[in-house]
Amino acid sequence: MTERITLNVNGKTHSMTVDPDMPLLYALRDEIGLRNPKFGCGLAQCGACTVHVNGEATRSCATPVSAISATDKVVTLEGLGTAEKPHPVQKAFEEEQVAQCGYCINGWVMTSAALLKQNPKMTDAQIREGLAGLKCRCGTHMGIIRAVKRAGTMMG
Amino acid sequence: MNAINKPAKKNFSVSRRAVLQGTGAFVLSAAVPTFVLSKKAAAQAARLGIAAKPALEPTQLDTWLKIAADGKVTAFFGKMDMGQGVDVAIAQVVAEELDVKLENVEVIMGDTYFTVNQGGASGSTGVQNGAIPLRNAAAEARRVLVEHASKILGAPADKLTVTDGIVSVVGDSSKKVSYVEMIGGNYFDVKVEWNGQVGNGMVVTGKAKVKPVADYRVVGKPYKRFDIPGKVYGTTDFVTDVRVPGMVHARMVMPPTAGASVVKIDESSIKNLKGVRVVRQKDFVAVVADKEWDAIKAREQLAVTWSKPTPPFPDQNGLYDYIRKATSAAKKVEEGNGNVPDALKGAARVIEAEYEWPFQSHASMGPACAVVQIEEGGKTATVWTGSQKPHYVRDGVAKILGMEQDAVHGIWVPGPGSYGRNDAGDAATGAAMVAKMIGKPVRMQGMRDEGHAWDPKGPASIHQAKAGLDAQGNVIAYWFNSKGFSRLDVNSNESDPSDNLPSQLGGSVSKAAMAFNVPEESYGFANKSMGWETIPQFFRNGNPLRSSHLRDPLGPQLQFASEQFMDEVALAANVDPIEFRLKYLKNPRDIAVMKAVAEKSGWKSRSRPNGKPGGTGTVAGRGVAYARRGGTVVAIVAEVEVDRSTGAIWPRKFTVAHDAGIIINPENLRMTIEGNIVQGSSRAIFEEVMFDRDKVTSVDWMTYPILETMQAPETIDVVLINMPNEKPTGAGEASMRPLAAAIANAVFDATGVRVRRGPLSPDRIKGYLSQA
């Protein structure tokens, strides 16, 4: 069973005929051809697949594509910022030299960007709590926390 | 020197054209590449300006370095960076020896058409071993170029100086010629001496002397990582992002009981999924689809009847008894002096303890992925892999495809983490097997349960220690013995298909090697013996608890035991743990590191723990531990808080003193250490592979929790000890080694309770505290 689905991703409209139960992740990666988000677990346990849906951090690996309507605004890391026009969180991650293997970094940047939009003046404890649930196997948490604080300063 | 023509006299402003045409040019090598370039490789070659190149042999200077017409230097590195900046260190070493700007150096790694096999990422030897051929090659290139410039400029070589790739006469900088003018875009075609080794031991040497350390200006500086922008702006392709035309998606279908065989496959169970194919080789079963989501659904849906083998595993609660009772397949005393049994007999007191460490998973951030494409009607192939040893993956894929090594092009693309011998090579093997069966390019990726349950594991083990004290509390005997699964049930490289899971399921017979280690330290005890025993794995082919290298293979568990034991002996001798270590450490660098960590952490001498068993609420404690690793020395003071009601440990602060010889890049070193400390904390506090008698039950992040932001330390204070006159040694793993012991020693200080079984998880700590 397939359905015609229309998505607004990074400001562009894409239509596709797919299984409505297919997670948004595969629509973004395989139908539209974006490279971020990443598949990490398929279980909403790690965050590597995080995108923004109407500004909210959303785990695309566990969100059926049919749950997203054509009017919802989906933004991926590609749409968040570029080296030329970086989002403050990306800039801060670059300045703090965060990432080792880098596979998880999509999730941290997207989640932090959504959190900081709500509250750019998070305390250390709020940052740690806000980012709970995200995984980084290389153990770059110290740099991530520094970068989110730095981004908060840039945004606040 | 076959490539240099007669010198030009007094030709001070030499045009590039003049240099190239008859006034002392290097002759463009006529050598033709011995390989046929795939499209992707050809594009890469064009980008680097190396369409024609002398054969890729270690003995060719051109194998290591290229100076392009625009002055860009490319260094061809046969080891790997896995996200710690090893490639930056390599660029620094090359820029240093060649006297060019760091910004002009690009490092190519992990591509088997452009790099020789220096062993890939292996044992933190990226700089320690990997930089040596590059350093020597760069020095040789500089020597050749300066000698050539000497002929052009009519001045002796020792009167020439090089700045940013321009050779000029000392005292008359108007007399100059650039590297670009002399060689830009061409080849040296100069031979270097090769020691004949492939892998970690590969060394090449030229006639040049390397630069004295005192003259270093690039080495030692904190240059930034090359890979960060691509990662944070999402422009870097990971191996999971590789797409080739006509590619299909494959997923493996794994047995519900480890060791089960296929009885029957009912393909009608997936008939609703159009175009999905099932492929099989004995018990290797995979589904293949044009669309990734179809492959995932087919994996869930496919009805396979599996045999019901005898449960292969012991009850997890009985794991350590199983190890204790198992017949050893190999044993070895690695280090010893004196007569331990006699000395123990004469001791006034004997201290004994036993420690236990579980199986741990690489649990990489994403399950492994690889793409294999067979080309030219089956003559050649390309494999895209995230493995840290892409040359070996190429070798393994070539064997599966029945091709010569050189017919297969291995291309490393960053993978979802690595940490040793994870599941990356298994994905490449599986992709190659399916590609061979169906004749299409295949992208194989695991699902989360494969990343956790089916990767090769860090081995489980027990460790026994005894020490004898005389009446004055001096150590007069020390015995340490480990018994566990081998660290090489499967090889740490993937060049033999029988070491890889899909081929094992497909019928290859695995060849396990028996290997374990002993703690690396410099305690000068009289009558000392350290050894190990290994036991066979539960079963050979397709065992999800087969073990192999997990970051710092065996280091955390060995030191978890030996460095806790040092504290136990110090306590018995009524001596402060640092004072005790300083009394027995023999290596001056170890002593310096121990003193540095004591000073920086503000260590307060104590011969007894501050905490006492019993009570509620949160208590704090400090512990120390130390290790050597391949020449690197690390000492750590951990400061932890223990919540006695929940058993939760928070490793609040670490002070790390770290001596890895001469420092190439202090900032990247610092970040590498931070990552080690956090990942090491995760392994010390949280990580244990769970299993029942049939299967591994750690299948995701809920059943295999790791450290998150809430538990990350508040502070990691790193003291970098730079040793300019000592060679650089590895930093990728050393600081993980003593970490679990430092935490356990801190828990003892906080609570008065000694935890001899890892990990120090909340439930376990709570259990220990309630029994104390």
Image (cartoon, coloured by chain):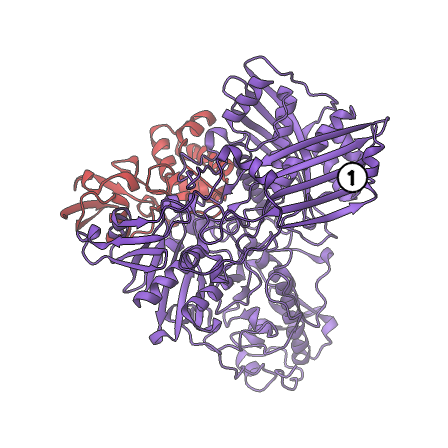
Chain drawn purple in the picture: B
Q: Is residue B172 left or right of residue B86?
A: right
Tell me, yes or no, if residue B435 can be seen here: yes
Q: Nearer the viewer, residue B67 or B328?
A: B328
Q: Which residue is mark 1?
A: B585
Quadrant the N terminus of chain B occupies: bottom right
Q: Residue B154: x and y, percent?
A: 70, 80
Q: Nearer the viewer, residue A75 or B486?
A: B486
Q: Is residue A127 above or below residue B338?
A: above
Chain hosting mark 1:
B
Tell me, yes or no, if residue A32 can be seen here: no
Q: Nearer the viewer, residue B450 or B331?
A: B331
Q: Residue B9: x and y, percent?
A: 67, 84
Chain drawn red in the picture: A
Q: Residue B234: x and y, percent?
A: 38, 49
Quadrant the C terminus of chain B occupies: top right
Q: Residues within 10 Å of mark 1 (few under 14, many from 20)?
A: some
Q: Is residue B691 left or right of residue B19?
A: left
Q: Amino acid at mark 1?
A: Leu
So how many labels did they put on this image? 1
